[in-house]
């Protein structure tokens, strides 16, 4: 399975047989070509695959995340909660975006936090429940939103200053009339 998390939409395509050739989930190298970070997690929360993009985004070398708990990517203060939420998700796994109503952070290897969009897609492979996790770095988007908010504040400040200047002009004109 592969997926893309882009603009709050999850897209996926199933692996299939065509022209006598079967593409199997064991051939995960194609997932390394995807520009979005992709993890495959088993039902115990163990990372069984991390593509190159996810590894690099999170400060790991390729293969370093394999076999580790997904909780190493969750900020320490949220790990216990994440584990219970993960188990609850596995009781009723559905395709969804985790970050729809909240800001999510991934913990990088060096300890820095990274704002992310995370999508989940359940998959059953060889009778094993897996979750395909999509990770997008949205730090650039947050920066754009911060600049936009700052520009809006400056615009409002400019309007306020203009209004004050206008009022002072009016006050000066009224004062001038009163002194005549």
Image (spheres, rainbow, N blue to C red):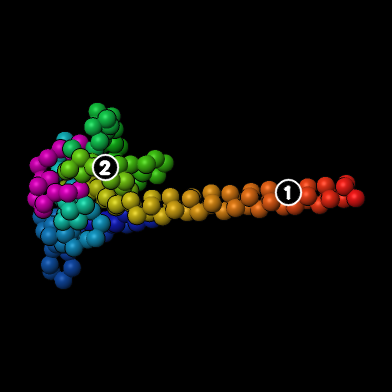
* Residue on which disc 1 sits: 168
Q: Between label 1 and label 2, give the one nearer the viewer.
A: 1
* Residue on which disc 2 sits: 113
Q: Nearer the viewer, residue 99 or 122?
A: 99
Q: Nearer the viewer, residue 83 or 125?
A: 83
Residue 4, image quadrant: bottom left
* Magenta part, dominant SS: loop
The residue at the point 73 percent across, 48 percent down is 168
Q: Residue furthest bottom?
A: 19
Q: Element type at marker 2?
A: strand
Residue 6 appears left or right of 39: right
Residue range corresponding to the magenta coloring? 58-71
Residue 38 appears left or right of 97: left
The image position of residue 145, as x and y in percent, is 43, 52
Residue 75 part of the magenta segment: no
Relative height, residue 74 to residue 146 (above, below):
above
On-image quarter of the N terminus: bottom left
The image position of residue 117, as x and y in percent, is 33, 48
The residue at the point 18 percent across, 68 percent down is 18
Residue 8 appears left or right of 49: right
The image position of residue 64, as x and y in percent, is 9, 47
Q: CA distance from mark 1 to mark 2?
A: 49 Å
Determine if residue 42 is in view: no
Q: Residue furthest right?
A: 180
The residue at the point 23 percent across, 48 percent down is 132
The image position of residue 118, as x and y in percent, is 30, 47
């Amino acid at each position: 399975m592969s997926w893309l998390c882009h603009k709050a939409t999850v897209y996926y395509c199933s692996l299939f047989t065509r022209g006598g050739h079967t593409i199997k989930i064991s051939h995960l190298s194609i997932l390394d070509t995807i520009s979005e970070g992709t993890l495959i997690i088993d039902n115990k929360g163990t990372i069984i695959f991390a593509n190159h993009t996810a590894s690099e985004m999170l400060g790991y070398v390729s293969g370093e995340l394999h076999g580790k708990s997904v909780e190493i990517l969750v900020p320490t203060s949220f790990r216990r909660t994440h584990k219970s939420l993960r188990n609850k998700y596995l009781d009723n796994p559905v395709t969804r975006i985790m970050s729809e109503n909240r800001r999510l952070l991934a913990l990088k290897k060096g300890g820095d936090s990274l704002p992310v969009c995370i999508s989940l897609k359940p998959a059953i492979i060889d009778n094993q429940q897996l979750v395909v996790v999509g990770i997008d770095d949205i730090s650039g988007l947050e920066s754009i939103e911060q600049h936009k908010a700052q520009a809006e504040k400056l615009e409002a400040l400019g309007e306020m200053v203009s209004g004050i200047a206008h009022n002072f002009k009016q006050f000066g004109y009224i004062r001038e009339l009163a002194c005549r």
